[in-house]
Every structure is written in C-alpha cells, then in structure tokens.
Amino acid sequence: MAEAILRSFDKELEIVSAGIEPADHVSPVAIEVLAETGIELKASVPEHYSKFADVEFDYLITVGDGTVDQLKLPPVKFKRKMHLGFHNPYKSFRDRNELKQKCREIRDEILVEMDYFYNRILKKKAAF
C-alpha cells in the first residue's frame, strides 16, 4: 500500500517495493481498500528484497509488524530510513469485514505518513 500511495503523489518518483518474506500475491482486500480512496494497487507478485541487493537507495521505508527495533532489516544499502509499524491484520481477524476495517485503518495511517514524507521531506529536499 505504501508504494501505491506514494506513487499516487508523483508518478515520476522512482519507487521499488520488496519484502523480506513477500507474499505470493497482493491482497485483494488491500486493493479494495485503496480503491476506496481512488488509488490503484495492481494485483501482482511482491518482489524479494534480494533483487535490489546492489542498489543504494536514498530512502528505505519499512512497513512491518512491530517496532523498528523488532524489525529484521534486510541487507540493502540506504542513506535514510523510516519505519511504519503495524500489527499484521491478516494474522488474527474474525471475518472479512473486520479485516477490511483493520486494513482501512492501516491505509489511513500510511496515507498520513506518506503525505508527510512526500510533502515535508522529498519536496523540501527537491526545493534546495
């Protein structure tokens, strides 16, 4: 979701998204709750971080279960990092409606964080 949200602010940004233990598909629930905000998240197979092992990133944005201290950081090169910690809603939910609601809450928080990152960090840096 973070990649699609950030990309929605500026189609010219160079963004890659990968995981330490990526799922074998993008969740239809994530696609659905992002579509509610007008942001398209395409069904795809998430990448493994090792595909980008030789790339040095300006920013590494981690999104994961737990705090930055608990996160297993992949061995990639980066200049700055930012962590968004959430409890994984797929680990414990009673029904699809509860899962959708939890995903909406995460979506809304990611929207706020990515808006701040884009407008207060990226655009500010580009102005210099």
Image (spheres, rainbow, N blue to C red):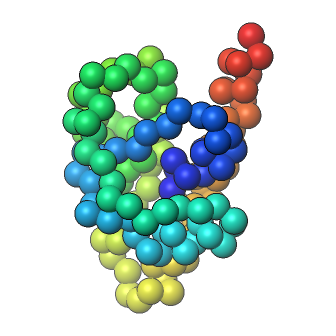
**Residue 4: % across, % down:** 55, 52
User: What residue appears at the point 51 percent right and 56 percent down from the top-left corner?
Assistant: 1
Residue 113 in view here: no
The number of callouts visible is 0
In the image, taking residue 21 as reference, residue 31 lies left or right, namely right
Q: In which quarter of the image is residue 123?
A: top right
User: What residue appears at the point 30 percent right and 48 percent down from the top-left corner?
Assistant: 47
| In this view, 107 is above or below 115 | below
**Residue 57: % across, % down:** 43, 23
User: What residue appears at the point 27 percent right and 61 percent down from the top-left corner?
Assistant: 23
Q: Which residue lies furthest to the right in this view?
A: 127
In the image, taking residue 7 as reference, residue 120 lies left or right, namely right
**Residue 87: % across, % down:** 40, 60
In the image, taking residue 31 as reference, residue 119 lies left or right, namely right
**Residue 94: % across, % down:** 38, 87
Q: Quadrant of the C terminus?
A: top right
Residue 68 in view here: yes
User: What residue appears at the point 43 percent right and 66 percent down from the top-left corner?
Assistant: 43
